[in-house]
Image: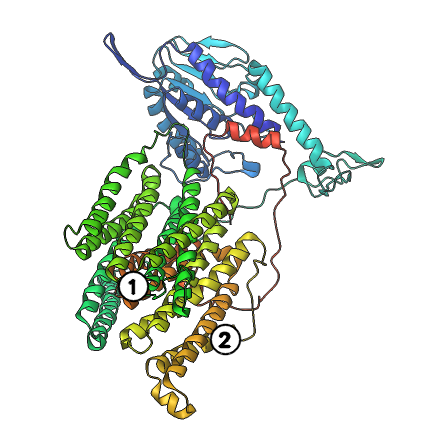
Amino acid sequence: YDVLSSQANIAGYRAIIEAAENFPRFFAGQMTAAGKVPPAKVLVLGAGVAGLAAIQTAKNMGAIVRAFDVRPVTKEQVESMGATFLEVPFKEDGSGAGGYAKEMSDGFKAAQAAMMLEQAKEVDIIITTALIPGRKAPVLVGQEMLDVMRPGSVCVDLAAENGGNVAQTVANEVVETSNGVKIVGYTDLPSRLAATSSNLFGNNVAKFILSIGPQTTKEKGMYQIDFDDDAVQNMLVSHEGEARWPDKITPYNPPPITKSTEVVVEMTEEEIMAEKNQIQMDSFVKNTAIASIAVAGLLLFGFTTDSHDSVTLLASFALAGLAGYQVVWGVAPALHSPLMAVTNAISGMTAVGGMILLAHGQSSSIVPDSPAMWLGAVATTLSFINISGGFLISGKMLDLFKRPNDPKDVFELYGIPAGLLVSGLALSAFTGIGDLSNVSGSVGIASAICCIAAIAGLANQETARTGNILGMAGVGFGLASTTADMSLAGAGASAFEQVGLLGGLGSGIGAVLASKVGPTELPQTVAAFHSLVGIAAMTGAAGEFLSSPDSLATGTLAAVYLAIFIGGITATGSMIAFGKLSGSLSSKALSLPGRDYLNLGMLVSSIIGMAAFLNPSPMADILQMDPEAIRLTSLSAVAGISALLGLHLTASIGGADMPVVITVLNSYSGWALCAEGFLLGNALLAQVGALIGFSGAILTWIMCEAMGRNILSVLLGGAGTSQQGTGEAMVMEGEINISTLDTVADALKEAKNIMIVPGY
């Protein structure tokens, strides 16, 4: 409710209009066949409300604008509006009480006068706005400056009512000097925009009246005068029949400006070089440690692997991981959520494990006849739910970015190359042209390429929907390749019927679930689908173990165990994330006593269980049990422990960090897919899993950096953070601004830029 500011804003705008009225040239420069017209040069003296309004108006009209103010704090405001801030070569701060300027010293005035004289020779228009409370307006443009200004130049004096900033100003008149400079001294500039000034003044008065009492308590119907409001208590001259003026009114004194004192430490050249060398050394040490760990891992893999095919698989894994690492850096932050949705849908490739399990079944009936086949059926169904629902959710997310003037997408044309590829695979399968295993492998390569391109497509809004389509194509090609692999494995007609029935059922369920999801429910739905991937990875790995427990090599057994461990964490962690994001669970972080020790205990138990699973003989001798029973027990135990660990890790993190948790779980689903790829010896699963795992890990790091979170703390369920708040409770400060729909709508219509911050 600052009347002075609202009216000064109008005066600054109108000053430029009056200057344009009296100026004999364009404001904006022009270059035509008839000749060149240079832009007007405008100098604004005083960068208060009126001065800033004048700067903005002159810039909008195409003029070259310069500004000067004795208050250094106005420099940033002037430059932010595109004007040049002039500085006097004399150090003195002109900031006074209440935001006004104070009177400057004689030395400063002399330096200012010299600078202004040089500017007067160059500029065409001068706007003066300098006022000092309780004093005659200072003369900023003296006779000497007027004498050097070019004929046709204009001065608009906003301080004419207080004596004027220009030497020959006459209040309420336009005078012309002997050398042709016009001086506008109107004192009624706001009145020359009567409708606008009346409207703003009316709003000022209405808001001031509201601030006196109706909004003090924030309770409807409650009236209480706010004596803590400086504007109210300074203007309240009487209260309840008692005079307040002048004794009981407390003059307003703005808080003093606190200047931060920065200690500048000057370093010698030797110290600067030593610091650079230390930074370089730290970088080399870090890279050396990472490379050493990678080398150790490669050697360990080489020492323990029992097949050259596993080395080829590792090569595919590494290259796909590097691809995922590279492409995710280019994804725009606004598209991080769609990226998670797309990679989650791609992780539905866990269907491959379920389909292969069904292919190995011996049943001639459409109903599975063994535990391994039932687990394969569950994995297939859940995976198809995730694929169908996941891509539909991704599409809904990306549709939120679609603008009415965007060109129409013709994705139907992409069906031609996709149809050719799948038709070629079918031709090889039914006619025997070419080696089906080689053709299937080629289709698998196309699948991996499309999945990588899907993430790359999400780098910007123009190609994001294409990325989603490429993800669908990648998964489709992968499933088609797996169908060929089922045929090569000797699958009967019943196996294909089972896959068709379960795939159709899962796709239908996913489509129905996704169709019911609104825009605000998209993030938590992605988390819900994540849980299906975790369960599918667990059931697929368990089914593979049960189908041939005696013939699996050590590396394959390790992949089984890791797939179940990672899948369990992903499944329950995603369920908790869904609950917190949807509001069905409290967003408050769970804080059990000994939280970090509980997590550590479950992790150690899982490691011990893995040792017993890989080499059950020592434990079998101690417990007098069959080795296979030890393995089953270890596998069942890790399924339960990993589920509890995922639940506890996610529950121990607050709701505000759930976006980061989802990226972590997204990465976990990729590693689960990798483990299943090594388990089945399937290069496609290893490639896609590495792509999702690495991209999810990098995205987690990016989001942790952006949100100021410690990535290790997030990965380990808040490890290292205090479980109990210490110190005094935070006091909420500031004023609650009550608004209406109409006010917000008007603000949105008038705004030049609007920033929308979506929240979880």
Kind of residue at disc 1:
Gly
Left or right placement of residue 210 versus residue 66 in this view: right
Q: Is 592 on the left-hand or right-hand side of 418? A: right
Classify residue 737 by image quadrant: top right
What's the residue at 59%, 55% (across, down)? 584
- Residue 723 as seen in the image, left or right of residue 209: left
SS label for mark 1: helix
Q: Tell me if residue 697 can be seen.
A: no
Closer to the chain start, of discs 1 and 2, is 2
Residue matched to label 1: 677
Residue 581: x percent and y percent? 53, 53
Q: Please state the horizontal and vertical placement of residue 333, each as a whole percent of the image.
A: 38, 46
Comparing 435 with 660, the one in front is 435
Q: Which residue is mark 2?
A: 598
Q: Residue furthest left?
A: 434
C-beta proximity under 8 Å, tags 1 and 2: no
* Mark 1 → mark 2, Cα distance in angstroms: 31 Å
Placement of 31 over or under 592, stated as above or below: above
User: What residue is drawn where x is 76% and y is 33%?
Assistant: 237
Q: Position of residue 489 (x, y in %)?
A: 25, 62
